[in-house]
Every structure is written in C-alpha cells, then in structure tokens.
Amino acid sequence: MARSKRFYGEVFGWLFSDYGPTYTEFFDGRITGGFTSTETVTPGGGPLVVFYAANLQETRDKLLAAGAEIVQPIFAFPGGQRFHFKDPDGYILGVWTED
C-alpha cells in the first residue's frame, strides 16, 4: 500500500487517508476513490481505468520518473489522445486528454 500511495501521490498529487491496514482513500479536491489490499495481483483481463490529465506529455514524464512503464505510447482517438502505463504493482491504466 505504501508504494502505491507514494507512486500516485507523486504523479497525481493525491492525498490519502487510511482506514485500517488494508484500505486507503485518495482525493485531490475533485475526485475521491480508494485502494484496497489483496493477496495477489492478477493484471489483465479487467476493466481499463483511465485518468484525465490536462497535459498528457507532462503526466507521462511524471509517470516515467516515478517508475511506471509505458506499455502503449500516446495515440489519437476521436476527441483526444491517450497512452497506457503499468504501475509498480503491475496494473495497466490509461491517461487521456482532449484535443
């Protein structure tokens, strides 16, 4: 949990509140969500969570500096651009921005 909090805090500026040893809430003044611990990580086969960023390149650079792996480079789609990355726990996520 500490590694995820450090990683997402550095990249997205999220703040965290712990509710016991296996759950933490994240927030940035606009969004709220949470992380929970599980026994094992099973990446792939699930939904793709995609975050919005006003500056796609800056967010990509922050992710790389924090240790993420870019698994799909920036590409265009109708209405915007996005890329996919793997976080330190092995989860694949995306970041998008408007055109």
Image (cartoon, helix red, strand yellow):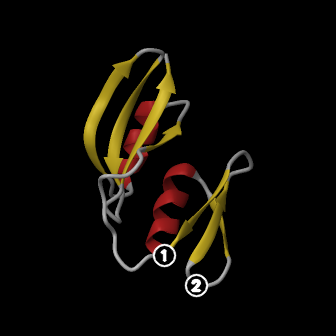
Q: Residue furthest front?
A: 45
Crowding near pointer 2: few (<14 within 10 Å), some, many (20+)? few
Q: Is residue 97 above or below residue 46?
A: above
Residue 73 picture location, percent across and down: 27, 33
Q: Which residue is mark 1?
A: 37
For badge 2, the amino acid type reads: Pro
Left or right: where 35 falls relative to 74: right
Q: Secondary structure at mark 2?
A: loop
Q: Which mark is residue 21?
A: 2
Front-most of 21 and 66?
A: 21
Quick one: label 1, few (<14), some, or many (20+) residues within 10 Å? few
Residue name at image x 31 percent, y 24 percent: 75
Q: Position of residue 39 (x, y in %)?
A: 39, 80
The CA distance from mark 1 to mark 2 is 8 Å
Q: Which mark, residue 78?
A: none
Q: CB of mark 1 within 8 Å of CB of mark 2?
A: yes
10 or 91, which lies in front? 91
Q: Is residue 69 left or right of residue 20?
A: left
In the displayed orientation, state which residue is furthest to the bottom: 21
Q: Secondary structure at mark 1?
A: loop
In the image, residue 22 above or below residue 32: below
Q: Nearer the viewer, residue 67 or 30?
A: 30
Residue positioned most to the right: 29
Residue 51 spot, x, y in % from top left: 51, 41
Q: Is residue 97 left or right of residue 88?
A: right
Q: Nearer the viewer, residue 52 or 13?
A: 52
| Labels 1 and 2: the sequence-earlier one | 2
Q: Quadrant of residue 35?
A: bottom right
Classify 79 as above or below 61: above
